[in-house]
Amino acid sequence: MLQSTVAGLTSGGAYALLGVCAVLMYRMVGVVHFAQAAVATFGTLVAAELFHDGMAIAPAAAIGVAIGAGLSLLLGAVMAIWFAQAPIEVRSTVAIAMLLGLLTVGSRLFGGSPREMPDPYPGAAFRIGDAVVTTSALVVIAFTVALAAGVGLLLARTRFGVLVRAQSERPVTAELLGIRVRALSVAVWTGVGAAATFGVFVVAPTRPSDVTSLSLLILPGLAAALIGLFRHVWVALAGGLAIGLAEGLLTHFGSVSAYRQVIPFAVVLVVLLWSQRREVWDVAR
Amino acid sequence: MVRRAVPVVAAGMAAVALALTACGAADDESSSQAATASAGTAASPPAEASGEPIKVGGLASLTGPFPFPDATKAAAAVFEEVNAAGGVDGRPIEYHVEDDKGDPAVATQAARSLIQQQDVVGLVSGASLLECAVNAPFYQQSDTRDVTGIGTSPQCFSTPNIAPVNTGPFAGITVSMYYASEELGHDKVCVIGNQPDGWNDALTAAVDRWSELSGLEPAMVDFGLNSTDDLTPFLLRAVKAGCQALVLEDVDFQTIAAVKAVDTQGIKDIDLLPLTTSYSEQVAEALADSKAINSGAIRLFANSEFEPFTGDSSANDEWRALMEKHGIPLTSTAQGDYIAAKAFIAALETIEGEPTREAVGEALVNLTSFETPMMGVPYAFGPGDAHNPNQASKFVQLKDGEWTVVTPDWIVLPQD
């Protein structure tokens, strides 16, 4: 049982990273970024292709991350230019459109044939009894912690952070004060895109590596972000890990194993009910 | 702010999940282009044969969430050859291919367009996860028969008007478990796999059939795998259950992920037996560096529904030459399409008089033994309410990045 649960740690790490990225995107540029994992998948699969063509793993990964960042930059620019003043519902719907677009282009570009995924951190880091903690799980979790802590510091301590906060909370005021709002938000998109790409690249070898499967990592990722109410980075991180571990645990029990895919949706429902608990019916409606 | 995020996420996740898992609408734009492109290449112009063309339909998921981009190409190549050699009774075959895009609505439309508008006399369909399920009743109503190269869903193997050439996932599970228990000598045989909607009964029946044949009970059965799953917890459970052989009813991506998980977890002494979908050059290449496989800690077998194409078996000579001539990748799918087209032609050639849809249907019902060295048993359409004529497989093992045939003789499931 412990073995199966710990095996969920790699997935949990990926969910946690995507959850943290989702919270960051929501807080800093006001979008529920459904296409985050799809962008990361693009970068990852480009890296895999380069690796396949004989490039060493480090430069391939670097180019992959750059592609992920670049693609994110483009999407961020689209959002900043055409949907800057749009309400969050509209911006998030645009993100869904981006996801579907990327899936379409992705399956055309990368096709349906399987490929070897380069494994930057292969093997087991250590064992707890029978249970194996993989190196890639540790790397992803450590990276997510560093990201969460780093962004926290950045927002609290630097001038850049203050500007980002200003443009996210009062975009119009910030713009009137002469802050270059568009450039800032595009910078955030780029940075978060790079981080997500790195994470997906690290966990990709343990998962079915087609475009759709990897892009759909965003669903548990968003559930993790919801656990953090799209506000608390650390709670989202813990939530992502918890979802991964719960999936591993449920797989162990044959009778309930089939229901583990429901977890993210169950989490959404619970948070939805919880977050609306004080609403008066008419108002909530 | 959060109150606004929650409903957006809830609605958005539902939308995304629906779009992707239920109807696979994700691919709409690209697939229409692909459909026209491949229809263009597939509908070959008559070269030598003149006379009024015989229209044959083809339907496959050329694009979509589970695409088979090369489906129907081999059949098109066979028809092209037939036309170049004078056609059937001097009449060329006109092959109309439609792409169902993995979308039930499109599959319904495509079948109606082929049968009602193009007025095809019969179908030689390629691989699709839903074509049979969606169109089987319509084929019965319209008295159209479909010789499918690669059947996947239960309805391909359980309805009167469709007779696939391949073994398929269900007989595939049975024959793989049978090979594990009877040839590899394992008592503890397990199976895990995906369960698309409506597959449950057929999957269970496949395992039950093995139990009857072998007199054994499976040590573990779990058809709750999902395409996005990390396979590690499943494998650990199989090890705990003491599985000596684990049949994987999965897709190639999952097989690769499973072997990666085996490597990472240091799992040993288990035979993995994925189905035909994993028997490809790409999988061999992707797993060439697997420590677990190369050190012999685990063995990886796959069932080949036709004469294994990676060897240089002479049974495949004609097929291989034709595929190379037309630049079609050598795959199991191409073998299925090839045999389907050949069997269809064989039926057409028995018709005296006008090859109408009724006449073709009758010819197929009378086609009870089409011999080909590429299959372990003869192909038959024949009468009957359900067809799964291919009850045989050969097995290949992955060694040092190459597939090696380990059963020179066919493993044929005993008929009850």
Image (cartoon, rainbow, N blue to C red):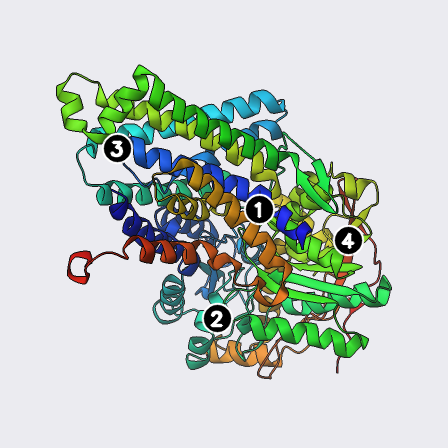
Q: Chain of mark 2?
A: B
For badge 4, the amino acid type reads Val
Of the residues under marks 2 and 4, which one precedes in the sequence?
2
Q: Residues within 10 Å of mark 2 (few under 14, many from 20)?
A: some
What is the C-alpha distance between the residues marked 1 and 2?
26 Å
For badge 3, the amino acid type reads Met
Label 2: element kind: helix
Do labels 3 and 1 touch, CB within 8 Å? no
Instruction: Please identify, in this view, whether the residue under mark 1 or under mark 4 is nearer the observer.
Output: 1
Q: Are marks 2 and 3 on the same chain?
A: no
What is the C-alpha distance between the residues marked 3 and 1?
31 Å
| Depth check, front residue: B402 or B207 | B207
Can see residue B279? Answer: no
**Residue A79 disc label:** 3
Q: Which residue is mark 4?
A: B396
Instruction: Please identify, in this view, whether the residue under mark 3 or under mark 4 is nearer the observer.
Output: 3
What is the C-alpha distance between the residues marked 1 and 4?
22 Å
| Depth check, front residue: B59 or B188 | B188
Q: Which residue is mark 2?
A: B133
Q: Which residue is mark 1?
A: A208
* Residue located farthest toward the front when viewing the structure as drawn: A278
Do labels 1 and 2 touch, CB within 8 Å? no
What is the C-alpha distance between the residues marked 2 and 3?
41 Å
What is the C-alpha distance between the residues marked 2 and 4?
30 Å
Do labels 2 and 4 touch, CB within 8 Å? no
Of the residues under marks 3 and 1, which one precedes in the sequence?
3
| Depth check, front residue: B393 or B45 | B393
Instruction: Please identify, in this view, whether the residue under mark 1 or under mark 2 is nearer the observer.
Output: 1
